[in-house]
Image: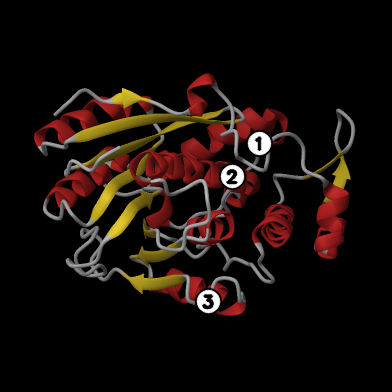
Amino acid sequence: MPPSRTTGPAAAGGLHPRNRHHGRYDFPRLVAVYPGLSRYVISHPGGGDTVDFFDPAAVIALNRALLMDDYGLVFWDLPPGALCPPIPGRVDYLHHVADLLTKDRGAGQKTDEKVRVLDIGMGANCIYPILGVGEYGWRFLGTDTDAGSVAWAKKLVAANPSLKDRIECRHQPLAEDIFAGAVRETERFAVSVCNPPFHASAAEAEAGAVRKLRNLDEGRLTERAVLNFGGQSNELWCPGGEVAFVRRMIAQSAARPAQCRWFTTLVSKRASLPAIQRALQAARAAAVRIIPMTHGQKHSRIVAWRFLEWSE
């Protein structure tokens, strides 16, 4: 396997240049699009407006307004306890994926409905398919091991005309399977995306939430605030954490090398990279890319690999 390369605009820090969400949110515009947001808008200590990011209802309302204003939705909501995603960070992943596809085949930076994307672990929020349709016009297959999350995602798709015929949602019946069971072996995708469960246990996931909250405001760290970040067990942790999940994904992708032109996943912890790179080498990946991402104080990376020698 050739050495992995660190690539992408975020190598210099900050959100991707094409990300719509640089700088502060335009709350007057967002409230005009979704008036329900107005009850959560408060004054920012540094001037201007903000919302209380410790209040889950406020964060959901902000997401709803962003999705309506920037991505063409008429309805978006979450079931109790579901993970509420930060939209700027989620869409950043897709912009970097678009760059991979642009190098491959001229797709990505222009709307291209011929691009089909596999979202592994779609979640009830269905956020990657929603953003990918709104930003690039791609088509998606989303899979999830939680039947309730799949049902909710289908509800979101059905409620939004812009998503119909663009997003298909399927239940993955076996948690240990990444592709088999939900994805037919003959199906082909330009790329797969995945936000894996990062933690190895529920206790580790809770500790991670505490650290995240301390970065925001240590003085307001409470049990309620920790719970407000949301996320079901399959979204937050699995035995062995992200290393075990990604290694399983690599092994199963090697058994289906033509399923995707690029297989990709988020990797939260830098310390996870050596084990993941060894797994890619053992699987004989033909190319590997490591793409840094930064969103506020959060630093992560995308690991991308492929097995077939597509032209770039």
Residue 243, picture quadrant: top left
Image quadrant in which the C terminus is located: top left
**Which residue is at 21% across, 70% downward?**
184
**Which residue is at 73% across, 54% downward?**
62
Q: Position of residue 193 (x, y in %)?
A: 38, 50
Q: Position of residue 271 (x, y in %)?
A: 33, 25
Residue placed furthest toward the top: 12
- Mark 1–mark 2 CB contact (< 8 Å): yes
2 or 3: tag closer to the N-terminus: 3
The correct choice, above or below, for 274 with respect to 54 in the image is above
The correct choice, above or below, for 158 with respect to 29 in the image is below
CA gap, disc 3 and disc 1:
41 Å
Q: Amino acid at mark 2?
A: Val
Q: Amino acid at mark 1?
A: Leu
1 or 2: tag closer to the N-terminus: 1
Look at mark 2 in the image and give the residue it sits on.
226
**Which residue is at 89% across, 31% downward?**
47
The correct choice, above or below, for 241 with respect to 159 in the image is above
Q: Is residue 300 visible?
A: yes
Q: Residues within 10 Å of mark 2 (few under 14, many from 20)?
A: some
Image quadrant in which the N terminus is located: top left
Horizontal relation, residue 205 to residue 251: left or right: right
Q: Nearer the viewer, mark 2 or mark 3?
A: 3
Horizontal relation, residue 155 to residue 167: left or right: right
Q: Nearer the viewer, mark 3 or mark 1?
A: 3
CA gap, disc 1 and disc 2:
7 Å
Comparing 109 with 248, the one in front is 109
Label at residue 221: 1
Q: Amino acid at mark 3?
A: Lys
Label at residue 37: none
- Mark 3–mark 1 CB contact (< 8 Å): no
Look at mark 3 in the image and give the residue it sits on.
164
